[in-house]
Each structure stands twice: as C-alpha cells, then as structure tokens.
Image (tube, helix red, strand yellow):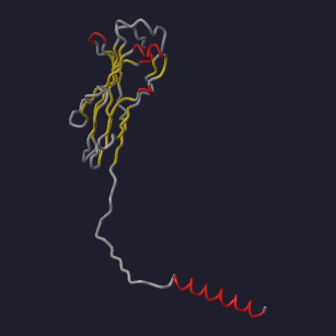
Amino acid sequence: MHKIVTGSIAGAAGIALLLGGAGSFALWNASASSAASAVSSGNLTLSANNDGVWTDITNGRSATINPANVLMVPGNTYQFTQTLNIVATGQDLKANLTYAAQSITGDSALIAATTKTLTVSSPDVAVQSTADPNTFTVSPSAATSTVKVVFTIALPSSATTGQNGTVNVGALAFTLAQTTIPS
C-alpha cells in the first residue's frame, strides 16, 4: 500500500509540473504602438437668455403683457419672444429645435382650443423643417449661435370651448435634440 500511495503522490506531482510548465512556454511575439491621436466628442447645449417678453398682437396691437394678468378670449393672439444660445459642434451633427409641448399645462379644453406656433428668426443657424413647421433643424457651428425664437399662442375666433380655463405658459421650455445620422 505504501508503494501505491507514493506512486500516486509522485504521479500527481508530475502532472502538476507538466500543467504548470504549459503556461510558461512562450512563442515569439511582438507589439507596436500606433501614431493615432485622441478622438474627441462634440457638444450640444441650449440656454435661454433672461430677455423673454410677452406681447399682445391681437388685431395689430403691440402691447407688452403679463399673461397672468390678462384673460384670453376667442380672437386673442399672444407672442413670447426670447433669445436662446446654441452650441452645436461635431461631425454630422444635426439637432431639432422646438418648444416642449408638455411644458404647457392647464385646462385640457383650452389647451386643445389654442393654436401654438414657433418661429426662429435666424435662418443661417436654424432651418424650418418641412415635416413639422414648429421644428427647426440646427447644424454645426464653430461658435455659439444666438437665435431669436417667437412662440405664438392664439385662441381662434371660432373657439367654442375653454371658457374659465387656464393655460399655464409660465414653464414654457424649448428643446434641442440630436437627430440620428442617416446611414
């Protein structure tokens, strides 16, 4: 029995040595570093200046208003004008600028009865989409671009719903979202 145990131990040690040595056997190999430089990402930001103004433009008026202090009736049209700063840098970058519909809250009947439009007065920076007139496509620029946006909300003369309602435009927001790169 002593020979069997000694033989088993010697055999296990031999197998361990063979397996351990397999990891140290080396073939020739080489490596080289490339001269490639770093890859950097672009940037897409949107910020609002503190210059927003509401104006009543009903029937040719041009009176500055506070929307919290006026009562809209059918036929009224109000505009909000503000400048936005856009940074859009990067190869093939395209982004859509629009207003965030979910930022307008309140009485659903009055919201549905109003028409809401957006215009951007900087065609060199933002081009109106043919698919959605309230969306403007922004392309890359080397510098920060300033655009003037005009958001218009109107209650058409034909409106029959929305009485005693409220449309909260106090949190009106604009969005700038990258579009996918066409393949």
* Vertical arrangement, residue 43 with respect to residue 47, above or below: below
Q: Position of residue 79 (x, y in %)?
A: 33, 20
Q: Quadrant of the C terminus?
A: top left
* Vertical arrangement, residue 14 with respect to residue 125, above or below: below
- Residue 84 sits in quarter: top left
Give the residue at the far bottom of this rendering.
Answer: 3
Q: Quadrant of the N terminus?
A: bottom right
Residue shown at the point (38%, 84%) measured from the top left: 28
Give the residue at the far left of this rendering.
Answer: 124
Residue shown at the point (41%, 18%) measured from the top left: 67
- Residue 73 sits in quarter: top left
Q: Nearer the viewer, residue 163 or 51?
A: 163
Q: Position of residue 77 (x, y in %)?
A: 33, 14
Q: Is residue 4 left or right of residue 173?
A: right
Q: Is residue 105 left or right of residue 17?
A: left
* Vertical arrangement, residue 72 with respect to residue 104, above or below: above
Q: Position of residue 118 (x, y in %)?
A: 31, 25
Q: Position of residue 169 (x, y in %)?
A: 43, 23
